[in-house]
Every structure is written in C-alpha cells, then in structure tokens.
Image: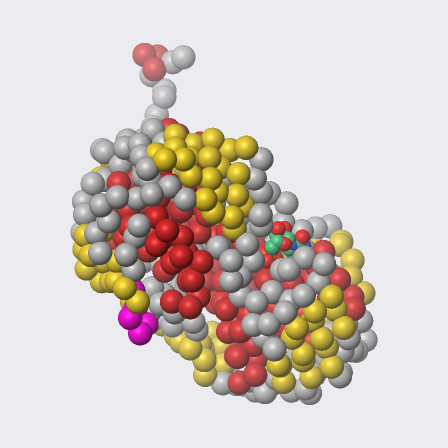
Amino acid sequence: MDVYKIKGGNRLKGTIKVSGAKNSAVALIPATLLADSPVTIEGLPEIADVYILKEILEEVGAKVTFENGTMTVDPTHVEDMALPNGNIKKLRASYYLMGAMLGKFGHAAIGLPGGCHLGPRPIDQHIKGFEALGAKVSNEHGAIYLRAEQLEGTKVYLDVVSVGATINIMLAAVRAKGRTIIENAAKEPEIIDVATLLSNMGANIKGAGTNIIRIEGVDALHGTNHTIIPDRIEAGTFMIMAALIGDGVQIDNVIPLHLEALIAKLQEMGVVIEEREDSLFIPRVEHLKSVDVKTLVYPGFATDLQQPFTVLMTQADGTSVITDTIYSARFKQIDELRRMNGDGRVEGSTAIIKGPTPLEAASVRASDLRAGAALVLAGLIADGETEIHDIYHIERGYGKLIKKLTALGADIRRVTLEPVEISNADNAL
Ligand code: EPU
C-alpha cells in the first residue's frame, strides 16, 4: 500500500507547469474512435484515467501509442464490442464510450461508470439525449445497452446543465442524420476542446461554449492532430498552493480566462496575481482575509476547486462559508482537515470554516480526487509529517505530482508501507 508522506512548512518557490486537462482528455480519447484514420492528441496528462482509457481502446481493437504526453489512436480496426465490465468500471468518464460507440456503430453496451463518490451522480440527461436521437436504451445487469437503426438529428433540452451529457450527445450526434440542437448546454472549456477536435475530424459543430450547440451530422470523420487545453483545475490547485505556502511561484501553461472566478476570490482574500500571457505569478502572501464562495457551472467558481479552497479558508482571518451547488455532499475533506486541527463544519451543502488555525500533521485518507488534492495542500502547510492514504484517487487526476512539488522545494515522498502483522499475543486486543 502506497502513501504520500509530506513534511510541512517548506516555502515553495520557482516555476511549475500545468498538464493537459484531465476532463478534456477523458472525452478526447473516446472521441478518436469516431474517425476512420489515425488521430494524434498532444499534451495529454500522464494520469491513471488516461492509461485506463488507452487499455479500453485497445480492448475494442484500436492501435494506440502513448509517449511523452502524445497519444496516437488508429481506430481502423475497432469493433462494436460490448463493454459491460472490467476497465470500464474504473472511471466515471467511461460513459463517453456510450456516445462514441453509438455514434460510430449505431449501438453500444457500456457498464455503468465508477469514479469519485460525490453523492448522487445520475446520467439521466445523457440517456435523454441518446433517446431523442432515436436510440432504444435499457439497463441490463448494470450495463447500459443502446440500440438505434439510424440516429436522427433532433432538438434536446437539458433539464440540468451537464458537462458529461453535453459532450456525450455531441459525440453521438456528429454522425447522426440531419441537425441536432442541444439547448441549455454546458459551457465549460473542455466542451469547446472536444468540439474543436471533432470539427478538425470533419464534424460540423457550431456554438460550443454557448448554451446552444448546433450539429449537422456527417457521413464520415477522419484523422487529425490536436493539442489539448491546459488543466484549469490543476492550475487552480497550484494557485491555491502558492497562496498558502508560496514564496513567489510562477504557474506555466495556464489560460487565465478559464480561472476568472478563482482569480476574483483569491484577490478578494488579498492574494496578488500577476497575469502573463500563458502563465501566472503569485508572490508570497502574508495575510488572508475570509471570503464566501458558491460553486456554480462555468464560468462560475468550479466545484472541483471547492475542496482545495477549503484549506485556504482554514488560514484566512475570520469565518469563511463555501456552498457547493453542484455536488452537495462533496465535503469529505472537512473531517480529515479537522483531524489536522482545522476548524470546519458542514451544514447541508455548506462548509463553515474558521481561521486562521495552524494545521498539525496527521494520518488522513483521500476519499476522492479533489479531497486528496486538498489534503496534499494541508500537508504542505502542517506542522510535522502528514501521511495520506488512498492516493490512487489523487493519481487519477494529478500527473507527476511528487516531481512537480519537489522541484518547488516541497518535502513529499511516495512510500510503500509494509503490512503490519498483529500475530503475536502481546498485540492481541
Ligand atoms: N446531473 C444530472 N443528470 C445527468 C448528469 C448530471 O442530474 O444526467 C447532475 C449531477 O448530479 C451534478 C450536475 O448535474 O449535480 C453536474 O454534473 P455534470 O454532468 O456536469 O458532471 P460530470 O460530467 O459527471 C464533470 C467532471 C467533474 C466535475 C463536473 C462539474 C468529467 C469527467 N468530470 O462531471 O470532474 O466535477 O463535471 O463540473 O468531466 C473532477 O475532475 O474531480 C470531477 C469530478
């Protein structure tokens, strides 16, 4: 069993580079299946979700190479295989195989997805879109079966603004007959990134990044080259880290426009942020003011930054309040922060945090990806050596984290713990 051990207190200084966006990568990779010749994507993050998707694509017959962040997928011999179990259950974003396989073959069978447990995460809006396009959908023993004679363009109104549903409907609709209009679509940068790849493959998509997306179906899609956008959530995590314990940190490969809500809140807390062309510089912060935050769909404050942000709130002067309107139960980090002497409590979908409280090292558990990121930040400022368990959650979304943080001066190691034997009588309970 591997854990992270972090000795807190080192001031971080220097330059850190953001990787390609995880939430784009997990959609771009399945999208490559729609082409009839090789697609190359550059700048992919080296994270567990990407490696699992590579294996899934190989299972269905694609030839895939992945080196130094560049993946080439040759989908020429992909088969319409059912994927009810196995790797498909290891990540939530495997639901993009539904849209991609449905768009390519007119049918698909995909196991219901796994991923982080953040409370209820239904996929009813994805299903609504597939049905509107003419697919018959059934849930058979935990796998979703989609079958269509011919996908037909249609109008879909999303009852909930959903990143996943918007992308999944796009993936299926690019090969449907006629025009599809997605109303109340999500506007996240990752949606624009997927639409850009699909357009370069020959799809006809207009309006990605607005709440109405129009797609004219085409008969075939071809190979192309694409460079992924930077990960705004990884960038945001590093910005929070720089505000917590930086001594002058430059964050490279950032699109500041994607981070406007976080930048505004950090500035409200007293953090100085110097925006450069595709990088940000955050000087050492001496004093943080408390602040209130509500997560919202893009361009609002991202739910994925809520958990790391609560660590910053423990160091702010006064009471801060943060409400998550996207995932009401995404607060499992608060209990772990309390173990580290943080003063926080959860009421419904809101966390109330008093500061500043010096954090103390403890043995803590990452319950999900962004809770894990929050605990890394907490460990970096805590007094003593923090041990973080269940780090596989963190490694689903943050590539080369130890290397990146060590280069800034952090004392963080990945350590294999030996199993403890409780066999002798002295230890018996
Ligand atoms: N929702 C429904 N029905 C649906 C789909 C969503 O009710 O059919 C609800 C969800 O329960 C949630 C809200 O709508 O309350 C938004 O969900 P959305 O579909 O937008 O989320 P997602 O596509 O499942 C992506 C990211 C998440 C990120 C959310 C919100 C990927 C692979 N995941 O999830 O990322 O939190 O959008 O921005 O893109 C993470 O990176 O840590 C992460 C969890």
* Quarter of the rendering occupied by the C terminus: top left
In the image, 290 versus 83, the foreground residue is 290
Which residue: 32% across, 12% down? 426
In the image, 366 versus 14, the foreground residue is 14
Coordinates of residue 389 in the picture (x, y in percent): 38, 38
- Please tell me in which quadrant of the rendered image residue 133 appears: bottom right
Coordinates of residue 150 in the picture (x, y in percent): 79, 78
Which residue: 59% across, 72% down? 210
Coordinates of residue 378 in the picture (x, y in percent): 32, 40
In the image, 260 versus 12, the foreground residue is 260
The answer to whether one can see residue 305 in this image is yes
Coordinates of residue 190 in the picture (x, y in percent): 51, 68
Which residue: 23% across, 40% down? 8
Along the horizontal axis of the image, is 13 left or right of 175? Answer: left
Please say whether residue 34 is one of the residues in the magenta stretch.
no
Quadrant hosting ligand 1: bottom right
**In the displayed structure, would residue 15 be above or below residue 150?**
above
Along the horizontal axis of the image, is 76 left or right of 390? Answer: right
In the image, 209 versus 331, the foreground residue is 209
* Quarter of the rendering occupied by the N terminus: top left
Q: How many numbered dots are placed on residues in this image?
A: 0
- Please tell me in which quadrant of the rendered image residue 22 appears: bottom left
The answer to whether one can see residue 104 in this image is no
Magenta residues, dominant SS class: loop
By what rule are the colours in the image chosen?
secondary structure
Which residue: 48% across, 67% down? 25
Q: In the image, which residues are magenta?
A: 276-280
Along the horizontal axis of the image, is 146 left or right of 427? Answer: right
